[in-house]
């Protein structure tokens, strides 16, 4: 029987198991297949298949010299290949959800007090598998300041959101705003507590929350905090790390531990690396509490922790990236890099898109180059064409 004679639901089941690259080609075969593959319900079905298929899982790696790589987590596939990167140099990964990636570009300068001023030049969301993208408006706060960006997905309304938290130098967090894909606009968020964010992007994304490490005001001894933004309630909340970790400064990492936020603290001096793993058992405002899960001392020598995916550390040893399972202590080499790694994010290929996506073709590349030239002279505000 020819595949074209099969019922559409059967074709959808077959197609949902195919990689995105193949599906894009199949859209050119006939109108029926193009309509099926372009259907949002099919995109959701395909995503669910991709999540359960290790051959669709990978890591997006950002290296020091503006190299960006895509490294498969499947050992039977090619260990890695250069990620064709259409948006020019200086792009920083913010995070990835459902195959969509948020990235930013900033301009740095120094004032007379040697504070680093950061101007947000560009904010975009794109799907590397389909090569579709959307440039986001920059929001109402565009003056040079300290900026941290988070990304998240609100499943009930199927709404992708980007949160931007900022402070002016010498001060603590003063404002926050959230962009929603469904409305394509920014909304001001109330900031009830003064704190200083330590990183320029969210440290981990868990379910509908973006998490950031922060520091309390000097009046509260500058203790380490965990800030989170709830994409559903659109509330920014802050909690301190566990009491036993307040005694002195520790090196902290954040990870998604079985769909729960986990705090990883290195509690031993060099050269030993002993870690405590704590999970936040309740994310509701005012009901958060910490639970110490376990202590571990990896038996694998490495230089630094890059990130975490699905309860596993991404470690870098020399130019090798290693997945370290914190439960059974298994290690797996997943690829090699050319330069020091600045960040790495878990990625699942998908057909997901948002309203206003454009295809990055030759015309878009030309417009991008023109905008980048104007950005360097400070005379442009980027707009997205629908």
Image: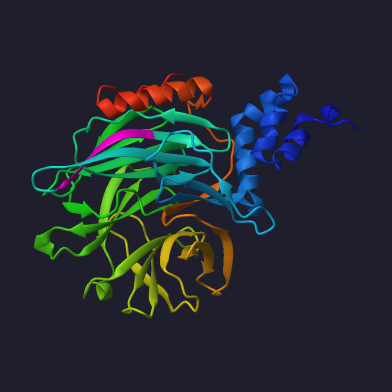
Q: Is residue 382 left or right of residue 113?
A: right
Q: Which corner quadrant holds the N terminus?
A: top right
Residue at the image point whose x is 47% and y is 64% from the top:
316
Q: Is residue 157 visible?
A: no
In the figure, 258 relative to 120: above or below?
below
Q: Position of residue 218 (x, y in %)?
A: 11, 61
Residue at the image point whose x is 52% and y is 22% from the top:
362
Dominant SS of magenta comes to strand
In the figure, 237 relative to 277: above or below?
above
Color theme of the render: rainbow
In the figure, 352 relative to 308: above or below?
above
**Quadrant of the rendered image containing residue 28:** top right
**Quadrant of the rendered image containing residue 79:** bottom right
Q: Is residue 242 left or right of residue 301?
A: left
In the figure, 138 relative to 54: above or below?
above
Is residue 288 on the magenta stretch? no
Q: Which residues lie in the magenta part?
A: 115-123
Q: Is residue 219 visible?
A: yes
Q: Position of residue 323 (x, y in %)?
A: 53, 64
Residue at the image point whose x is 51% and y is 56% from the top:
337
Q: Position of residue 48 (x, y in %)?
A: 62, 45
Q: Is residue 116 left or right of residue 56?
A: left
Residue at the image point whose x is 36% and y is 79% from the top:
271
Q: Position of residue 71 (x, y in %)?
A: 56, 52
Foreground pick, 16 / 288: 16
């Amino acid at each position: 029987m020819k595949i074209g004679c099969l019922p559409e639901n059967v074709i959808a089941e077959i197609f949902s198991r195919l990689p995105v690259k193949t599906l894009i080609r199949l859209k050119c075969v006939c109108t029926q297949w193009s309509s099926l593959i372009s259907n949002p319900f099919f995109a959701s079905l395909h995503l669910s298949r991709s999540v359960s298929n290790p051959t669709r899982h990978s890591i997006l790696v950002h290296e020091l010299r503006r190299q960006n790589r895509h490294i498969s987590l499947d050992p039977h596939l090619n260990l890695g290949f250069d990620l064709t990167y259409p948006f020019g140099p200086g792009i920083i990964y913010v995070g990835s959800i459902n195959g969509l990636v948020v990235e930013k570009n900033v301009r740095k300068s120094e004032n007379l007090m040697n504070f680093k001023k950061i101007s947000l030049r560009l904010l975009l969301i794109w799907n590397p598998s389909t090569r579709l993208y959307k440039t986001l408006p920059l929001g109402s706060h565009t003056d040079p300041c300290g900026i941290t960006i988070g990304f998240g997905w609100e499943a009930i309304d199927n709404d992708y959101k980007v949160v931007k938290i900022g402070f002016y130098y010498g001060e603590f967090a003063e404002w926050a705003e959230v962009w929603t894909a469904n409305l394509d606009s920014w909304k001001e968020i109330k900031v009830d507590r003064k704190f200083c964010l330590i990183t320029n992007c969210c440290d981990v994304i868990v379910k509908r929350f973006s998490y950031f490490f922060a520091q309390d005001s000097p009046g509260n001894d500058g203790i380490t905090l965990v800030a989170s933004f709830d994409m559903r309630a659109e509330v920014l909340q802050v909690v301190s790390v566990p009491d036993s970790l307040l005694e002195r400064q520790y090196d902290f990492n954040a990870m998604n531990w079985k769909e729960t936020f986990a705090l990883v603290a290195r509690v031993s001096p060099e050269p030993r690396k002993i870690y405590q793993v704590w999970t936040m058992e309740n994310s509701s405002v005012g009901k958060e509490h910490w639970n110490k899960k376990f202590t571990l001392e990896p038996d694998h020598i490495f230089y630094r922790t890059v990130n975490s995916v699905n309860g596993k550390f991404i470690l870098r040893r020399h130019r090798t990236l290693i997945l370290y399972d914190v439960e059974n202590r298994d290690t797996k080499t997943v690829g090699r890099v050319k330069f020091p790694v600045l960040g790495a994010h878990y990625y699942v290929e998908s057909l997901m898109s948002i309203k206003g996506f454009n295809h990055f073709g030759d015309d878009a590349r030309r417009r991008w180059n023109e905008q980048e030239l104007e950005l360097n002279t400070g005379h442009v505000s980027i707009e997205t064409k629908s």
